[in-house]
Image: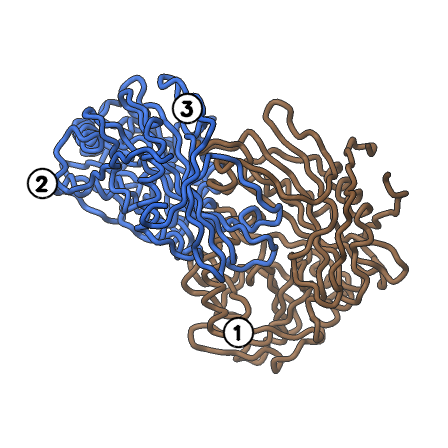
Chain colours: A blue, B brown
Amino acid sequence: MSNKNISITLTTNKKQKPDVNNLVFGKVFTDHMFVMDYSSDKGWHDARITPYQPITIEPSAMIFHYGQTVFEGLKAYFSEDGKVLLFRPEKNMQRLNQSNDRLCIPAIDEELALEALKELINIDREWVPQAEGTSLYVRPFIISTEPTLGVHPANNYKFMIIMSPVGSYYKEGIHPVKIAVENKYVRAVAGGTGQAKTAGNYASSLKAQEVAEEKGYSQVLWLDGVERKYIEEVGSMNIFFKINGEVVTPELNGSILAGITRDSIIHLLKHWNVPVVEKRISIDEIFQAYKDGQLEEVFGTGTAAVISPVGELFWNNERIIVNGGQTGELSMKLYNTLTGIQLGKESDPFGWVVEVEQKVEHK
Amino acid sequence: MSNKNISITLTTNKKQKPDVNNLVFGKVFTDHMFVMDYSSDKGWHDARITPYQPITIEPSAMIFHYGQTVFEGLKAYFSEDGKVLLFRPEKNMQRLNQSNDRLCIPAIDEELALEALKELINIDREWVPQAEGTSLYVRPFIISTEPTLGVHPANNYKFMIIMSPVGSYYKEGIHPVKIAVENKYVRAVAGGTGQAKTAGNYASSLKAQEVAEEKGYSQVLWLDGVERKYIEEVGSMNIFFKINGEVVTPELNGSILAGITRDSIIHLLKHWNVPVVEKRISIDEIFQAYKDGQLEEVFGTGTAAVISPVGELFWNNERIIVNGGQTGELSMKLYNTLTGIQLGKESDPFGWVVEVEQKVEHK
C-alpha cells in the first residue's frame, strides 16, 4: 500500500521489451496497469496496480452502447541524466475531470490519479525507452461498466491507466504534412462534446480522415459546424498560424479541445515576446494572408508530435504551399525548446516538468 | 449449423426467468447471445450462438478509446395466438449498415444477421414474455476490438445480439410526458453522426437529460446546432405535431435519426388519408400554433414507447399545455393500431410483421 492506499500486485511473468527501433504507436503495453472502480454506493474505490491483463465485462456494459467514457494522453520521457520526466501531468488530470463533468462521469481525485500514475511508471520504469525521440505513452481512461441498457449516467465505472512505449514521431526528422480542409463532415459544434476528450469525437472523425487519406492528405482541418467557415482544429491537434509576424490560434470556443501543448506553446511565445492571439479565424483569412504573402508558418500542436508543421493546405480546389513546403523557423524553435524542456535538456521557466522519483522496487 | 453457417452451443445451465410483473428495462438477459467476429484478413466470420456470458477484451481495445461502435434496438412480441412476432426487423439491419458506413465499420450481411436474430429468438423463445405490454427487447451492436491506440478505423470488430425481457412502457396506461426544449446543449449537427445510431450521440445527450430531469421534465427536445431554432428530435425519439388537422414532423436532415417507428407512423397516416408533411419546423412555429389555438397534439415515436404523447412543452420560460395535458385522439389511435399490428391483433396492410417460426429445439 502506498500512502494513498493504492494496493500493488506485481507480475510474476515480465514480458519481453519490444525492439526500441521498431515501436509502433500504442500496440505493446507494459507489465502493469492501474485500475480503480466506481459504484454509486461506494464512490471511487479499490485503487490498485495489477499485472497488465484483459478485462472481463458484460456485453450489456453501457460503454458498448452509450459511449460514456473519457480519456487522456501524456508521455513520460527518459532524460539524459537518467531521470524519468512527465510534462504537466496535473493538467491532464484536471482536463480529465472537465471531460468527466460534460459526460456525467463522477470526478476522480486528481492527486490520487497523479500518484497512481507516478507509482505505475516507477514500477514499469524499465519500460521507458531511452533512444532519441522515444517515450512512454500513458493513457488514463474511464469507461462506464454498468450492465444495463437504460439511457442514463451509469452507476458503475472503471478508471484505468495503461502505458505503451512509443517510437519517435519523426523518424526521418521533422517534416511538414499536407492537410485538407474539411467541408462535408463536422467534428463538433458548440453545445456538443468537442471540448471534452471523449470517444465519440474520435469515432465521428474517422470518415473524414479516411476520405482525406485516400486523396493523399495526412489529416483534415475542421471548420466550425455552424458557418463552415471558422477554423477549429486539425485532425486531433490544435492549429497555429504565423501571419505577418503574429501567431494566431483559434480561441477556446467550446467545441475545440483545450490542448496542453497548445497552452504550453502560447506560454512560450509570450515568454519570448512573440505576439500571439487567440481568436476566431476564418479559413478565408488564411488563404487571403497567403495571397498577400503574409502566411509565414502553419503548425499543429499535440502530445504525439509536439509540433507538426503544415506544408500544404487544400480547400475548395485551391492548394497553398506554406513556407515553400519547409518547416518554419519558429515551428522548429518551438519544437526544439518544448522537447528540450520535456527531456530536461532545456531550462524549465514555468516548472512544467515533474520527475517520477525512483523508489525501492516493491516485492 | 443452420443453413447460414451459424454454429450453436446451448447453455447447460438455464437461468431463472424474472418476474414478468417487475421487469426493469435492459437489466436481465436471456440464456443465449449471438456473436460474430471481424478481422481485416478474414472479413466477418465465426457466426455463433453461445450461452450469454461476459466478454474478455483488452484494455487497449479501440471501443474504449475512440468509440467506433453502432447499435440497433427492436422488439419481439408474443401474439394472442402464441406466435413470436418481429416488427420490420430488416429495417434495423439496413440502418445498422447505414450507421456502419458513417462510422467506417465494415458492412454486415443483413440476411445473415436477420437469420441469426430469428435463430437466437427461437432458441430463447420461452424468454418472450406473454403479459400484456411486455416484449423481448433485442439489441444488436458492433464494437471495435482491435487492441491499439492509433486513431484509425479498427481492423477487428465483434457483432453481438443480446436480448432482454422488458415490461410495459405504460404500466398505468398511456400518459403524456413533460418535455423541456434544450437551448444550451446540442445533440448533433449536419456533417456529424446524428443520423447514425452510435454511442457518442447518447453519451453527448446525458448532460442535458440530467439537467431536464432535475427540473421535473422527463426528456428534452433538441434544437438544431446551427440556428438553435429548428426542431430535431426529443430525447431518443422522433417527434410529431398535429397542427390544424395536419401532422408535421422534422424532415430527415442528416442530423436526426431515421426512426423505424417514425417511418411506420408516416405510412399509417398516409394510408388513413391524414395529411402528413416532413419539413423543417421551428420551435417558434409550434409556440405560435399553440397561441393560435391550432396545436392539437404532440407525440414522440420510438421503439421503447411506440407513441409517447407530450402534454407539456417548456421553452424560454414559457410553458404550453398540449391538448389539456391529455393524450390526443390521433396519438391514441396510432398507438392502438401500431401495437395492434405488432401483436398480430390488427391487419397488417404493409406486411410489416415477421414471424419467428418455431423450430425443433437444438440438442
Which chain is disc 1 placed on? B
Q: Position of residue A9 (x, y in %)?
A: 44, 38
Circle 1: is it few (<14), some (14-19), or many (20+) Cα within 10 Å? many
Q: Is residue A223 left or right of residue A77?
A: right
For the residues beneath circles 2 and 3, the answer to whether they share a chain is yes
Q: Nearer the viewer, mark 1 or mark 2?
A: 2
Q: What residue is disc 1 on?
A: B313
Q: Position of residue A339 (x, y in %)?
A: 22, 30
Which chain is disc 2 placed on? A
Q: Residue at x 10, y 38 (%)?
A: A272
Q: Residue furthest bottom?
A: B324
Q: What residue is disc 3 on?
A: A24
Identify the amino acid type marked 3: Val
Q: Is residue B64 visible?
A: yes
Q: What residue is disc 2 on?
A: A273
CA gap, disc 3 and disc 1: 53 Å
Q: Position of residue B209 (x, y in %)?
A: 49, 64
Element under disc 2: loop
